[in-house]
Image: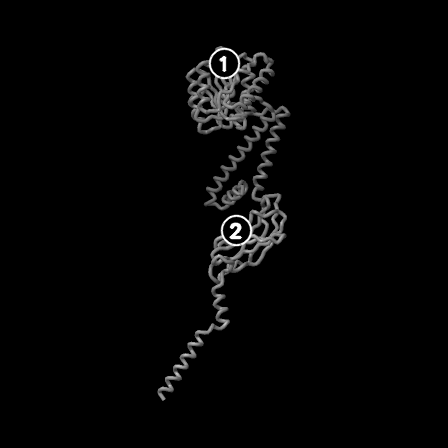
Amino acid sequence: MNNLSALMIFLLLFAAGSALAEDPPQSVVTEAAEELEVCSAVHLEASDTPEDAGGSVSLYWQMEIDGFEPDSLGVMRSDPSGGEELIVTLPFGTVMYTDQSADNGTEYDYWVVSYSGGTVGTSSNRAEAVPSAQWIYKGRIGMLIILFLMAAVIIYYIESGKKGRKLFIREIAGLAAVDDAVGRATEMGKPVLYIPGIMDMDDIQTIASIVILGRVARKTAEYGSSLLVPTSRSVVMSVAQEVVKEAYIQVGRPDAYNKENIQYLTDDQFGYAAGVDGIMVREKPAAIFLLGTFYAESLILAETGRSVGAIQIAGTAMPSQIPFFVAACDYTLIGEELFAASAYLSREPKLLGSLKGQDAAKLFFMILIVIGVVSATIGDFWSPLKSVAEFLRKLVTVN
């Protein structure tokens, strides 16, 4: 009896072991697979990027919260020809992307896939979009309005100048002394030395300097003084020769023009400085003009000119060199005064009107800055002014 009971227990244990060794039910497998499924991107939306120059599509999506995290996300794209391509791989957690490689007017189909173990686990829904360019960028409308106002003011001053209205421009001491400097050189029987900087004609300061050179050349032609113009660029030399020649012709003294007085020295910065210093020491000019772009050679030139007893008029828009000119020269044009020289010397209505309009625009922005700073400061205690500060910030902000 005991043997029979033991046999029955053995058979029951054997049957249970066999049942456990078999595959689990299909429902159990399915539930396990669902619990281990990779998170998928859902609710994918694709749209043309607003207020841009085109060629861009913005994508937004969400990630499922059920399942395990994928290794990375891939943004797929297909075009009307049917070609599919992976355009970018993004880290998990990214929920937006902007495709900058699209063509305007082409309809694209996008979807996001989840990678796990180097293979595609799941895929999102598909979304379509067509990129296009917009005419108006709303983020810059404020600056557009300000631009139109500035243009209107400049045109107003130009037209006023054409009608004969006297436009006031404050006196610039360095430019007012041009006639005195050339006259002094004439009385002493010494030449005038004009240095147009060390940069080429593609530099705006060199262009402004050449304009002033024309005015100085007319004065030297009228007074009968010798004008020396050493240059560090061959193109500047050619332009200077033509400007000076034209100035002598306008005054009626073409015979006094000497092409050899306008010469090219060298492109080397300190080689040019050494050459100009040699001219100063040998010729001992009574008036020296240093107008244009200068760097480390500025003080070398200015100190040498001071040592020969010349009256010096300097000007540059290089902030680091202005202190040297102020210390060593008699007159210094600071920053924008160099660019205003052409309007100041010629008194031509268009140039004067443009200069007055720009000054009005600068005054407008200065007032705007003061109002904005005061509003932002007091706005922390009084909300109406805070609204004013926010409005001004949006008006001048370029996104």
Label 2 packing within 10 angstroms: few (<14), some (14-19), many (20+): few
The residue positioned 43% from the left and 75% from the top of the image is 20
Q: Amino acid at mark 2?
A: Val
Q: Which mark is residue 155?
A: none
Q: How is the image coloured?
A: one colour
User: Real-space Cα distance between discs 1 and 2?
Assistant: 69 Å
Identify the image quadrant of residue 160.
Answer: top right
The secondary element bearing badge 1 is classed as: loop
| Residue that appears at 45% across and 27% down | 295
Q: Position of residue 94 (x, y in %)?
A: 49, 53
* Closest to the observer, 50 or 368: 50
Please state if 357 lies on the left or on the right of 322 as rendered: right
Pick whichever of labels 1 and 2 is earlier in the sequence.
Answer: 2
Q: Characterize the local packing of mark 1: few (<14), some (14-19) or many (20 or more) Cα atoms within 10 angstroms.
A: many
Residue toward you, 236 or 58: 236
Q: Quadrant of the N terminus?
A: bottom left
Q: Secondary structure at mark 2?
A: strand
* Vertical relation: 323 (above or below) 41: above
Q: Position of residue 230 (x, y in %)?
A: 50, 19
Q: Nearer the viewer, residue 393 or 267?
A: 267
Tell me where residue 203 appears, x and y as whole percent. 53, 28
- Farthest residue, direction bottom: 1
On the image, numbered disc 2 is attached to which residue? 88
Kindly identify the amino acid type of the residue bearing the numbered disc 1. Pro
Q: Is residue 268 above or below residue 129?
A: above
Tell me residue 34's x, y (percent).
49, 66
Q: Which residue is mark 1?
A: 191
Which of pointers 1 and 2 indicates the residue nearer the eye? 2
